[in-house]
Image (cartoon, helix red, strand yellow):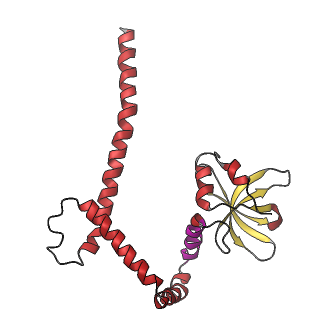
Amino acid sequence: MKQLTEFLKTTAMGGLFILLPILLLYLLLAEALGLIVALATPIADLFPAETFGQVEFPAIVGLILILGVSFVIGLGLRARIARRSGRWFERTVLDRLPAYNALKNLTTGFTEACRDGGFKAAVLISPDGEQEIVYVIEDHGNGNLTVLVPWAPAAFSGSVKIIDKDRIKILKANLGDVSRALGHWGMGVRELLADKEE
């Protein structure tokens, strides 16, 4: 009887470990498709009512609409007057919002390594020689830096410190690479440390 119970338990658990990720993937895809349709609905409302009346695959049409509008907006931003207008709007409106510059620097840090003015990935060297991955948030201009010391695996949670600039070595890596390594409890940090700025 004990062997039968053990057999049933291990078989059910094995099946659950296969079924559960499949169900989670299905739910995730269903949510993503629903989100695409929800985002595309205001765009579709700009067209005549009968244009998208009987759509067989609304998620695909929604994705095409979102990409099409993004492309058109991108084309518009390439025009000189649109760029000037965008910079003016950023300076006069968005720069006054408290979190805008922080979010802008954060998103730029994900795509560009060692950008002036943006968040930068770095190594903080303690007096006893230990090293920590940090994000340089702000240069004070007086030899001090504001840094975020992240906690793994939560790459953007941590403590904020004011550090002497001499204790920091900037990494030639973007924030996406660094946060990925922190999210994996340090796997990949060796490659990040192989390429430091002096």
Q: Residue at x 42, y 83 (%)?
A: 76
Tell which of 48 and 142 is nearer to you.
48
Q: Residue 172 location in percent, x, y?
A: 69, 62
**Rendered-image quadrant of the C terminus:** bottom right
Is residue 155 visible from the viewing direction of this image? no
Does 14 sit left or right of 125 as displayed? left
Q: Residue at x 36, y 28 (%)?
A: 15
Q: Residue 64 location in percent, x, y?
A: 31, 67
**Looking at the picture, does residue 160 appear above or below residue 79?**
above
The number of numbered badges drawn on the structure is 0
Q: Residue 116 location in percent, x, y?
A: 68, 74
Quarter of image, res 42: bottom left
**Looking at the picture, does residue 33 appear above or below residue 89?**
above
Q: Is residue 107 magenta?
A: yes
Quarter of image, res 135: bottom right
Q: Residue at x 68, y 49 (%)?
A: 189
Looking at the rendering, the stretch of residues picked out in magenta corresponds to 98-109
Does 166 sit left or right of 30 as displayed? right
**Looking at the picture, does residue 25 appear above or below residue 150?**
above
What type of secondary structure mainly makes up the magenta span?
helix
Q: Is residue 15 magenta?
A: no
